[in-house]
């Protein structure tokens, strides 16, 4: 995903994907303030297993960096498919060819796993499963052409979804859930290629752009969506991402209130967050499904997503079980208390 700025700074955004009409910071903030409430719902009894989720992170990383066309990418994709099938979900693989900023045409493999595919009412959970081919934010320039392992930036979101899928037998929601693992999210131009890359951010999130314009089910609809990105970092604090507030502020309130209900509010802060070009953006714009991004925002003048973001340090030893558990239990609370 591409980072623009912390929302508390003054900035001007160009049109993103040629569709976005940006709202103001004050509008996003006032919406959240008006809808923030103390949660009153009963805590869901199902417990998210952090050790299981961490094992899913480790397993993905054991394949190696899941960069386009690599053996690790194929093996990990096959593993994700097998896991979802093991949990009795209907799996659809979406294969496409996408054009990249550097003039290549690369294969893209989106993995969709559906619970109760026949249900009309649905919730969308998503994350990206690919790895960035370049550690272009690493402090050591010698590492910039090395691939990112992606323990946090990729594997953590998929791991949380796999653990939620494992627990569906206990949750037994009466509505449908679609888990989507997006490919080719992190192939956006590195700093040495930015001059020749699109200036609107469209070189990122290629898998979700494709799916949002070509969903696996014609006329696909969901009540709302939740994107998980970098949800396992030791330094994670989740703020109100800018586009999430523009498109889906009520869903932000729903999720943040669930975090309060399970005692995870020290991680889910009622503060303005980053402006992220991420997989939720094409879902909001092309499909009109209100979708938020649970993504960390580091405080301070430099901002950013995580200390390990796009570096060689994005490895399992820098994953926090506590953060994985906070996000996972929050999702369990959202799904377990949902009534349509």
Image (spheres, grey):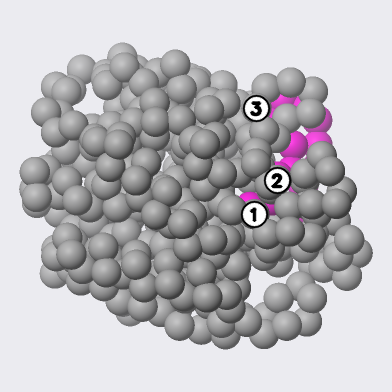
Q: Main secondary structure of the magenta part?
A: loop
The residues bearing labels 3 and 1 have C-alpha atoms spaced at a distance of 20 Å
Q: Is residue 270 above or below residue 126?
A: above
Residue 34 visible in the current orientation: no
- Residue at the location (43% across, 72% down)? 75
Q: Where is mark 2, residue-wise?
A: 311
Task: Tell me if mark 1 has few (under 14), some (14-19) or many (20+) residues whose alpha carbon lies within 10 angstroms of its own.
Answer: many
Quarter residue 146 falls in = bottom right
Toward the viewer: 275 or 236?
236
Up/down of 145 relative to 215, above or below: above
Q: Residue at x 89, y 61 (%)?
A: 192
* The residue stretch that appears in magenta: 1-15
Residue 95, above or below 282:
below
Q: Nearer the viewer, mark 3 or mark 2?
A: 2
Question: Does residue 257 appear left or right of residue 276 in this picture?
Answer: left
Q: Position of residue 140 (x, y in %)?
A: 84, 43
Q: Which residue is mark 1?
A: 148
| 55 or 199: nearer the viewer | 55
Residue at the disc numbered 3: 298
- Asked whether 3 falls inside the magenta stretch, the response is yes
User: As rendered, which of 57 and 205 lies closer to the eye?
Assistant: 57
Please say whether residue 16 is one of the residues in the magenta stretch. no
Is 48 above or below relative to 85?
Answer: above
Label 1 close to label 2 by CB (< 8 Å): yes
């Amino acid at each position: 995903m591409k980072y623009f700025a912390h929302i508390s700074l003054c900035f001007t955004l160009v049109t993103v994907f040629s569709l976005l009409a940006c709202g103001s910071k004050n509008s996003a903030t006032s919406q959240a303030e008006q809808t923030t409430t103390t949660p009153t719902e009963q805590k869901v009894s199902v417990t998210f297993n952090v050790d299981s989720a961490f094992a899913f992170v480790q397993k993905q990383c054991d394949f190696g960096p899941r960069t386009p066309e690599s053996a690790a990418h194929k093996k990990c994709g096959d593993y994700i498919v097998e896991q979802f099938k093991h949990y009795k979900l209907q799996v659809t693989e979406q294969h496409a060819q996408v054009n990249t900023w550097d003039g290549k045409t690369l294969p893209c493999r989106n993995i969709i796993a559906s619970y109760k595919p026949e249900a009309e009412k649905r919730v969308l959970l998503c994350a990206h499963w690919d790895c960035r081919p370049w550690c272009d934010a690493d402090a050591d320039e010698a590492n910039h052409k090395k691939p990112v392992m992606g323990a946090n930036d990729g594997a953590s979101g998929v791991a949380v979804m796999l653990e939620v899928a494992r627990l569906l037998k206990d949750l037994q929601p009466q509505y449908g859930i679609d888990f989507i693992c997006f490919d080719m999210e992190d192939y956006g131009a590195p700093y040495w290629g930015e001059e020749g890359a699109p200036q609107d951010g469209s070189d990122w999130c290629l898998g979700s752009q494709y799916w949002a314009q070509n969903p696996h089910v014609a006329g696909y609809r969901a009540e709302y969506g939740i994107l998980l990105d970098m949800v396992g970092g030791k330094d994670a604090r989740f703020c109100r991402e800018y586009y999430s507030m523009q498109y889906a502020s009520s869903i932000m309130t729903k999720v943040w209130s669930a975090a309060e209900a399970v005692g995870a509010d020290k991680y889910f802060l009622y503060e303005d967050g980053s402006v992220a070009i991420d997989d939720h953006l094409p879902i909001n714009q092309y499909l009109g499904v209100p979708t938020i991004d649970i993504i960390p925002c580091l405080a301070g003048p430099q901002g950013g997503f995580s200390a390990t973001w796009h570096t060689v340090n994005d490895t399992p030893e820098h994953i926090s079980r506590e953060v994985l558990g906070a996000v996972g239990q929050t999702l369990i609370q959202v799904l377990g208390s949902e009534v349509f």
